């Protein structure tokens, strides 16, 4: 079995900022820090250069993406609708440290972010991001559509359920408090927002992507 590639972690906002060569160290420095900003890089040099810039220079990037789909397939799919918002989640482990956010699809301006939470899953984060987005768009009386790259989260929202196998415990209480609020919102509100699957194979990573893959 081949060894996993070494990664370096840049922390722009956390209990301590800088570049670190251990995920466990990084995790300890972002735990319970509101709106922590961090990302992994393949080399120490890249991580150090990133630290001199902004976190938002390195998330949701699609500049180098080239689709493997045929011209006919791309034509059939078309372009993204930029009168929209995009949501995504990131989880370091399953379960693991989780967060989610929503951005303007065209400008990538961040509209909301929650986390990082000590324990959650990517599916839960994607679900919470969708409901958060629905509530925000309804509050603003917006006719934008909303993109997600998670079919599971779309299904959960449609069924007004959170069908996670994660068991409740002290570590994930904050996450399940949000899940309960989200389910309550879905059961007590109607909405006109259209939720659309982001076409990753045609367009690259969703603009709300945290860039930590």
Image: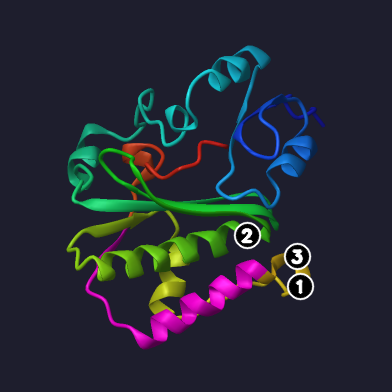
Q: Is residue 51 left or right of residue 56?
A: right
- Element type at mark 1: loop
- Asked whether 188 falls inside the magenta stretch, the response is yes
| Residue depicted at x 47% and y 27% | 54
**Which residue in the structure is indicated by mark 1?**
169
Question: For the point 61% across and 20% down, which residue is it?
Answer: 47
Closer-to-camera residue (198/67): 198
Residue at label 3?
171
Position of 29 relative to 183 (above/below)? above
Q: Which mark is residue 121?
A: 2
Identify which residue, 153 or 102, lies in the foreground. Answer: 102
Q: Residue furthest bottom?
A: 188
Check if mark 3's residue and mark 1's residue have beta carbons within 8 Å: yes
Q: Which residue is most to the top?
A: 45
Specify start and end residues of the magenta stretch as a single range.
174-196
Report how far apart the C-alphas of labels 2 and 1 lie in the structure: 14 Å
Q: What whole-number distance in Å separates the C-alpha atoms at marks 3 and 1? A: 6 Å
**Quarter residue 110 falls in:** top left
Q: Earlier in the sequence, mark 3 or mark 2?
A: 2
Dividing the picture into quarters, in which one does residue 172 lie? Answer: bottom right
Point out the tag, 2 or 1, that comes first from the N-terminus.
Answer: 2
- The kind of secondary structure element at disc 2 is loop
In the picture provided, is 171 more to the left or to the right than 72? right
Of 76 and 123, nearer the camera is: 123
Q: Is residue 55 left or right of residue 138?
A: right
């Amino acid at each position: 079995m081949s060894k996993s590639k070494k990664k370096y972690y840049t922390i722009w906002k956390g209990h301590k900022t800088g570049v670190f060569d251990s995920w466990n160290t990084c995790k300890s420095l972002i735990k319970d820090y509101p709106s922590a900003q961090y990302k992994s890089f393949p080399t120490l040099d890249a991580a150090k250069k990133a630290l001199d810039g902004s976190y938002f220079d390195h998330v949701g990037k699609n500049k180098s993406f080239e689709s493997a789909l045929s011209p006919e397939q791309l034509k059939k799919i078309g372009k993204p609708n930029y009168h929209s918002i995009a949501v995504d989640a990131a989880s370091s482990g399953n379960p693991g440290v989780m967060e989610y956010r929503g951005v303007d699809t065209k400008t990538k301006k961040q509209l909301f972010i929650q986390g990082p939470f000590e324990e959650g899953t990517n599916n839960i984060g994607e679900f919470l991001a969708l409901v958060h987005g629905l509530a925000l768009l309804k509050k603003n009386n917006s006719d934008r559509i909303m993109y997600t790259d998670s079919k599971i989260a779309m299904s959960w929202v449609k069924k007004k359920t959170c069908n996670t196998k994660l068991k409740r415990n002290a570590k994930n209480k904050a996450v399940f408090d949000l899940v309960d609020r989200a389910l309550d919102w879905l059961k007590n509100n109607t909405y006109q927002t259209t939720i659309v699957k982001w076409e990753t194979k045609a367009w690259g990573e969703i603009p709300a992507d945290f860039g930590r893959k």
